[in-house]
């Protein structure tokens, strides 16, 4: 579904991505892990075309990402999603649907369906400015699902949520997994990644340093968190 080969990106003299190669298979949920500033968000932005790679290629469903048609397969939730504060959640989703050339009647129907899916079915007339953090996260997931994309790119979808909100959003993601969506999730909450994902890839300082099945990371009873910290520490030591 997504095949990234030797992706590099520099901002001025700063190299943010250094020959990143990553593959996400159809129907797979991949956890994309790394410290702050490791290159996770830049990689996701490169996939959706918000930044252009300095080198390398990205192929989405056999189409190069530079081909705008490839983006029809994608749903994207950024780390800090922006909403029009004076629209209701329903109006916002209708607006997003119409940007995708979905006719108004279908847009309204889809907006109501998605709000119900993410647990906002009783909040259709509430203005986004009055949404809590958890509600905004759920709305962010809903807008990523407009148009029923095959592939979802979710940047920190569980960030800043209280335990109840995190549980609710996690259940939404588990439902999407059951539906067979291909999902790339960037997150710092490793316990949830361990529960949600089939595989993980760890990036640090712009390089993929380790990837594999969850079961490969947590052998001998160690947690994913310990495996993650060990991978980062080993890389840092090897550079000294």
Image (cartoon, grey):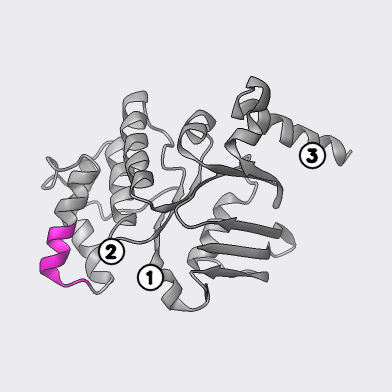
Which residue is at 45% across, 37% downward? 196
* Residue on which disc 1 sits: 72
Where is residue 232? Give x, y as percent. 72, 36
Where is residue 83? Give x, y as percent. 30, 53
* Number of the label disc, if any, that sits on residue 88: none
Q: Is residue 116 above or below residue 229?
A: below
Quarter occupied by the C terminus:
top right
Which residue is at 51% across, 40% downward? 187
* Residue on which disc 3 sits: 235
Q: Is residue 176 left or right of residue 94?
A: right
Contact between marks 1 and 2 (CB within 8 A): the answer is: yes
* Residue on which disc 2 sits: 147
Which range of residues does the magenta coloring cover?
102-110
The mark nearer the N terminus, 2 or 3, is: 2
Report, in whole angstroms, how far the alpha carbon at label 1 lies from the one at label 3.
37 Å
Which residue is at 37% across, 24% downward? 163
| Most foreground residue, 50 or 60 | 60
Secondary element type, mark 1: helix
């Amino acid at each position: 579904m997504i095949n990234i080969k030797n992706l590099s990106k520099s901002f001025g003299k700063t190299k943010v991505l250094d020959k990143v190669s990553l593959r996400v298979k159809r129907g797979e949920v991949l956890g994309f892990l790394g410290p702050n500033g490791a290159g996770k968000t830049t990689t996701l932005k490169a996939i959706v075309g918000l930044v252009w790679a300095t080198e390398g290629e990205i192929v989405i469903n056999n189409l190069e990402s530079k081909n705008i048609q490839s983006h029809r397969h994608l749903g994207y939730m950024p780390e800090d999603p922006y909403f029009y504060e004076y629209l209701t959640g329903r109006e916002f989703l209708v607006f997003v649907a119409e940007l995708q050339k979905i006719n108004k009647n279908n847009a309204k129907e889809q907006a109501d369906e998605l709000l119900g899916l993410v647990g906002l079915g009783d909040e259709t007339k509430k203005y986004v400015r009055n949404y809590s953090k958890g509600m905004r996260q759920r709305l962010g997931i809903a807008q990523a699902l407009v148009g029923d994309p095959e592939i979802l790119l979710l940047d920190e979808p569980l960030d800043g949520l209280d335990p109840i909100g995190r549980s609710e959003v996690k259940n939404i993601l588990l439902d999407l997994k059951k539906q067979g969506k291909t999902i790339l999730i960037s997150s710092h909450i490793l316990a949830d990644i361990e529960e949600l994902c089939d595989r993980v890839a760890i990036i640090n300082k712009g390089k993929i340093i380790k990837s594999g099945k969850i079961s490969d990371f947590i052998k001998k009873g160690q947690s994913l968190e310990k495996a993650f910290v060990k991978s980062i520490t080993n890389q840092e030591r090897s550079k000294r």
